[in-house]
Image (spheres, grey):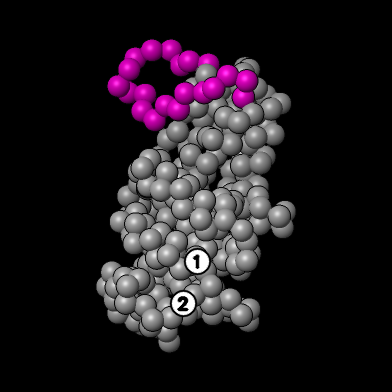
Amino acid sequence: MTKIAIVGCNGKMGGYVAEAVGERDDCQALFGVDAFGESKYDFPVYKNFSEAQEKPDVIVDFSHPSTLSDMLAYAKANRIPCVICTTGYSPEQVEAIHEAAKEIAVFYSGNMSLGINLLIELSKMAAKVLGSSFDIEIVEKHHNLKVDAPSGTALMLADGISETLAQEPQYVYDRHAVRKKRAKNEIGIHSVRGGTIVGEHEVIFAGHDEVVSLKHQAQSKAVFAAGAVNAAVFLVGQPAGMYQMGDLLSGN
């Protein structure tokens, strides 16, 4: 039985994680950590890790960048692996995550959906075939409460595509500030915020007289929670290091 601590348990995604854990027989929510410190569950909720009396097998984090330092300090001190699903980190925080992975197992992904990770692989395949003869644009859409832009998933798509290109691309987020012809090595990344859109990502390969488009739509946030719990069960017992969805899918 995998015992899980859920960071941000009182938030929307934390609630989905708690629900996903409750539907499984191989894991349980041991406690939650949330700034509000109030429990609506059958497990205790603490305002920070220093209040926790129990020791989990793994931590699942769907919270806010401000919680990272406390969580990593606790995880390293107690040798507890972490599944980090929060986005919007600063470069310094991302570096802190990689440093922590030298001591503990860290599963770090901007998107826990199986479909999104398939989209990334398909986009990489398309980039290999179409190469520099097609312009590449990424459009991501999310609900009007999402703070960070572009989404972590959009950057995952761009980074995956970049790995396959002969020339290192330039990410362009805003075209209105400069009036000039589009450079061939650009990857345009565009953000849309509105309504209750859960998450849509489209990769457009625009060539001469033809366009290839790859698209993924998430109908519910539950898909991300289910992926996070799968990652948590997988991560227990793994040696220190950085892990991603590809490791989970391959079973390595």
Q: Which residue is mark 1?
A: 80
Quadrant assignment for the C terminus: bottom right
Asked whether disc 1 touches disc 2, contact meaning CB atoms under 8 Å apart, the reply is yes
Residue appearing at x 36%, y 57% in the figure: 68
Depth check, front residue: 75 or 122: 75
Q: The magenta stretch spans which residues? A: 165-184
Image quadrant occupied by the N terminus: bottom right
Q: Nearer the viewer, residue 187 or 143?
A: 187
Q: First in sequence: mark 1 or mark 2?
A: 2
Q: Main secondary structure of the magenta part?
A: loop
Q: Does the rendering let one see residue 125?
A: yes
Q: Circle 2 is placed at which residue position?
A: 55
Tell me the crowding category of disc 1: few under 14, some 14 to 19, or many 20 or more residues within 10 angstroms, Cα based.
many
Q: Which mark is residue 183?
A: none
- Circle 1: residue type: Ile
Q: Tag 2, which secondary structure?
A: loop
Element class at badge 1: loop
Residue lying farthest to the left in this orientation: 36
Residue 87 to residue 11: above or below? above
Q: Nearer the viewer, residue 137 or 68?
A: 68
What residue is shown at x 53% (from left), y 77% (from top)?
3
Image spot of residue 136 (x, y percent): 55, 27
In this picture, residue 196 sits left or right of residue 169? left
Look at label 2 and name its amino acid. Answer: Lys
**Quarter occupied by residue 197:** bottom left
Q: Is residue 23 above or below residue 134?
A: below
Residue 97 placement (x, y as % from top left): 44, 50
